[in-house]
Image (cartoon, rainbow, N blue to C red):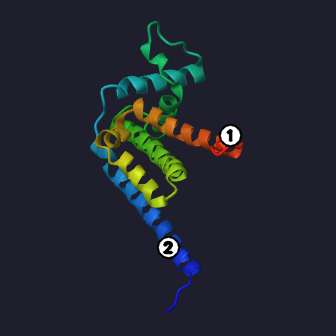
């Protein structure tokens, strides 16, 4: 049996796509399965209260109390997580925080996809990029925090997505032409 180079590449491309789908699928399944294994972190209560205060400000016009330190953090993630968790579990109980943990993990999961694409553009290979993404995910501190850290993981995820977006912007405008 003789195979042409095009046939071999098509076969490897199909295998590569399935390999990536399986890798990301396993990551998502493991994340969903262990999402409830983590408790509430020390700053999660204050970030949840910050999200609640932001929603109250938006919907009712209630001002923040004097000396409120949380106003130095970005309100988007905390407010969105609080609003979504409140729709599913209106009381701030275990289910409420499990939903926040799940939202935090999904945001991190999404950023790992962007990290893979960013690494692929620099490394030139799906397999090296997947290794880079695997190293990010298997860092024990980052992986654990991707469930219960409402400050650092959203910031890390936003930075990854921002770097990817900036790189795509620079490439599309010819600003990353290193040869000239």
Residue located beneath label 2 in the image: 12
Name the residue: 34% across, 54% down.
30
Spot occupied by residue 3 in the image (x, y as percentages of width and height): 53, 86
Horizontal side, residue 43 vs residue 176: left or right: left
Instruction: Please identify the quarter of the rendering in which residue 170 is found.
Output: top right
Instruction: Please identify the quarter of the rendering in which residue 44 is found.
Output: top left
Pick the front one: 17 or 173: 173
Pick the front one: 34 or 82: 34
Check residue 175 in the rendering and tell me which mark sits there, or answer none: 1
Name the outermost residue toward the right: 173
Mark 1: secondary structure: loop
Instruction: Of the two numbered discs 1 and 2 on the same chain, state the one appearing first in sequence.
Output: 2
Name the residue: 56% across, 79% down.
5
Horizontal side, residue 177 vs residue 108: left or right: right
Picture mark count: 2
How many residues crowd around disc 2 within 10 Å: few (fewer than 14), some, or many (20 or more)? few
Pick the front one: 4 or 57: 4
Spot occupied by residue 11 in the image (x, y as percentages of width and height): 51, 77
Spot occupied by residue 166 in the image (x, y as percentages of width and height): 61, 38
How many residues crowd around disc 1 within 10 Å: few (fewer than 14), some, or many (20 or more)? few
Mark 2: secondary structure: helix
Name the residue: 41% across, 38% down.
100
Q: Please state, as top left, top right, bottom left or bottom right, where the C terminus lies in the image.
A: top right
């Amino acid at each position: 049996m003789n195979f042409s180079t095009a046939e071999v590449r098509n076969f490897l491309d199909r295998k590569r796509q399935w390999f990536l789908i399986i890798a990301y699928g396993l990551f998502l399944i493991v994340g969903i399965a262990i999402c409830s294994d983590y408790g509430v972190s020390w700053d999660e209560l204050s970030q949840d209260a910050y999200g609640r205060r932001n929603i109250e400000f938006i919907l009712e016009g209630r001002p923040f109390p004097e000396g409120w330190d949380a106003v130095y953090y970005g309100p988007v993630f905390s407010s969105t997580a609080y609003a979504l968790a409140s729709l599913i579990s209106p009381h701030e109980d275990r289910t409420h925080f499990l939903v926040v943990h799940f939202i935090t993990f999904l945001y991190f999961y999404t950023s790992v996809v962007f990290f893979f694409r960013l690494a692929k553009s620099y490394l030139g290979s799906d397999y090296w990029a997947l290794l880079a993404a695997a190293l990010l995910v298997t860092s024990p501190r980052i992986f654990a925090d991707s469930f219960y850290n409402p400050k650092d993981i959203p910031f890390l995820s936003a930075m990854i997505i921002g770097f990817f977006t900036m790189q795509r912007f620079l490439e599309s405008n010819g600003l990353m032409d290193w040869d000239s």
